[in-house]
Image: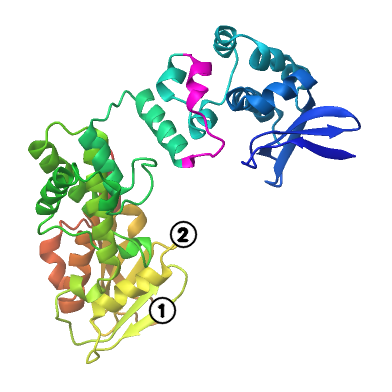
């Protein structure tokens, strides 16, 4: 039989219950193997209950000190009740100076206290009792998140000035640097917003004429990694030059914002935007390494290169990174090897006769990124293998080509 003896307004703050005549402090913490919250409890005395009722700060300090024991219990272990009981007198009944001394020796959850209004500067100096004078029952999760973010930056040796912090708040990355940045002017203090907007304007001006293109090698939502790196470098260089006092975190978040917005634009840009409006006049077939095939015929509304890259987007995957465009009428084709950053052009030297198979000439070339692939594919669909002569060099000997590929990989 269990009855609640004392509880506070916040549901997560430990409460006191009486079970079979025994007072116990009970709290939810951690999770079990099924990700359900675990509940822990341990016995307390009437004198401990009296302090918990009257002193919110001491109640929260006890919670902060018990939480590491709950973490140590893991998903299925038992709470070390002896260790929990041993915390009661030093935290609840001792003089403030002794409590401060105890907290210098034991592990405790500082973020929990920050969330409930504890003075951060006092906590940092080890004056935990004084820090709890501003404590509240209500929890401010964002305050705790900001505290943890600041601690992570401090561990990296990063110190933010007011403008740095304002820029990070503008992009929504003050708390979590891995989140996709957005434009949040309302998150910035009015006095700092004009200065933040000058930083953003510098970045936007640096991006003039740059874009991040779609990269069919990465599927339908893929974008060109090289374009991203180029844009990020350009923005960071411009921002550092115009605003030399900005911290690296602020500079990087602005570049991240510009690149993310460019990626969004790329997602709505049709593949036609990357191709010249010109095609050859023969039927082409597209195949992948898994036996799929698609035929393009001249005279339609779609460019051959566009239909090929759509075919790639739909079919590319690990283990399916070789695609071929073949012109059967001319007896030639190209094969792109995404896994090797290379392409082969294949021409029929001699048709098969008398049961013998045809003889082919195969030449290889290294490809420099997505723009290189686009140039090769566009040239081939317009003019066949002959149109690729200026896009080499082409290497006939496969062993020599492999040596060239290894040399490039070692740069």
Q: Is residue 405 visible?
A: no
Q: Is residue 76 above or below residue 400?
A: above
Element type at marker 2?
A: loop
**223 horizontally vs 316: left or right:** left
Picture coordinates of residue 245 (x, y %)? 14, 31
Residue 210, image x, y percentages: 14, 57
Which span is picked out in magenta?
126-141
Q: Is residue 281 visible?
A: yes
Residue visible at 8% across and 37% down?
A: 241
The residue tagged 2 is 319
Element marked by disc 1: strand
Q: Which residue is mark 1?
A: 293
Q: CA distance from mark 2 to mark 1?
A: 17 Å
Left or right, 132 with respect to 210, comes to right
The residue carrying pointer 1 sits among few (fewer than 14), some (14 to 19) or many (20 or more) residues within 10 Å by Cα, namely some
Query: In front here: 256 or 6?
Result: 6
| Closer to the camera in the image, 212 or 56 | 56
State the image quarter where residue 250 is shown. top left
35 or 387, nearer to the observer? 35
Give the label on residue 376, or none.
none
Query: Residue 370: x percent and y percent?
Result: 24, 59
Q: Residue at x 91, y 32 (%)?
A: 20
Which image quadrant for residue 24?
top right
Mark 2 vs mark 1: which is more N-terminal?
1
């Amino acid at each position: 039989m269990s009855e609640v003896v004392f509880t506070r307004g916040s549901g997560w703050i430990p409460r006191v219950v009486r079970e079979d005549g025994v007072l116990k402090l009970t709290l939810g913490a951690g999770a079990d193997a099924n990700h359900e919250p675990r509940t822990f409890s341990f016995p307390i005395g009437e004198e401990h209950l009296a302090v918990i009722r009257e002193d919110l700060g001491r109640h929260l300090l006890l919670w902060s000190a018990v939480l590491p024991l709950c973490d140590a219990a893991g998903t299925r272990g038992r709470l070390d009740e002896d260790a929990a009981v041993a915390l009661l007198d030093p935290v609840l009944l001792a003089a403030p100076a002794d409590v401060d001394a105890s907290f210098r020796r034991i592990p405790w959850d500082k973020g929990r206290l920050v969330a409930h209004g504890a003075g951060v500067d006092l906590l940092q100096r080890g004056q935990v009792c004084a820090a709890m004078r501003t404590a509240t029952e209500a929890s401010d999760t964002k305050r705790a998140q900001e505290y943890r973010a600041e601690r992570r930056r401090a561990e990296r040796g990063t110190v933010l000035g007011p403008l740095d912090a304002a820029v990070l708040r503008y992009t929504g990355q003050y708390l979590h640097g891995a989140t996709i940045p957005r434009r949040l002017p309302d998150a910035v203090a009015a006095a700092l917003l004009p200065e933040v907007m000058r930083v953003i304007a510098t970045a936007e001006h640096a991006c003039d004429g740059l874009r991040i293109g779609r990269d069919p090698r990465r599927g339908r939502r893929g974008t060109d990694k090289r374009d991203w790196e180029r844009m990020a470098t350009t923005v960071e260089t411009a921002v550092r030059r115009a605003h030399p006092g900005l911290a690296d975190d602020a500079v990087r978040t602005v570049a991240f914002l510009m690149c993310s917005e460019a990626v969004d634009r790329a997602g709505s840009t049709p593949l036609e935007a990357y191709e010249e409006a010109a095609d050859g006049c023969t039927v082409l077939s597209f195949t992948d390494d898994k036996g799929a095939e698609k035929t393009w015929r001249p005279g339609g509304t779609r460019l051959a290169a566009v239909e090929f890259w759509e075919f790639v987007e739909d079919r590319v995957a690990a283990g399916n990174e070789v695609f071929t465009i073949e012109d059967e009428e001319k007896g030639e084709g190209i094969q792109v090897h995404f896994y090797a950053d290379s392409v082969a052009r294949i021409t029929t030297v001699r048709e098969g006769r008398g049961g013998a198979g045809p003889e082919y000439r195969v030449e290889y070339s290294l490809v420099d990124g997505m723009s290189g692939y686009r140039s090769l594919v566009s040239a081939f669909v317009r003019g066949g293998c002959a149109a690729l002569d200026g896009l080499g060099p082409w290497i006939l000997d496969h062993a020599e080509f492999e040596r060239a590929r290894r040399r490039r990989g070692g740069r």
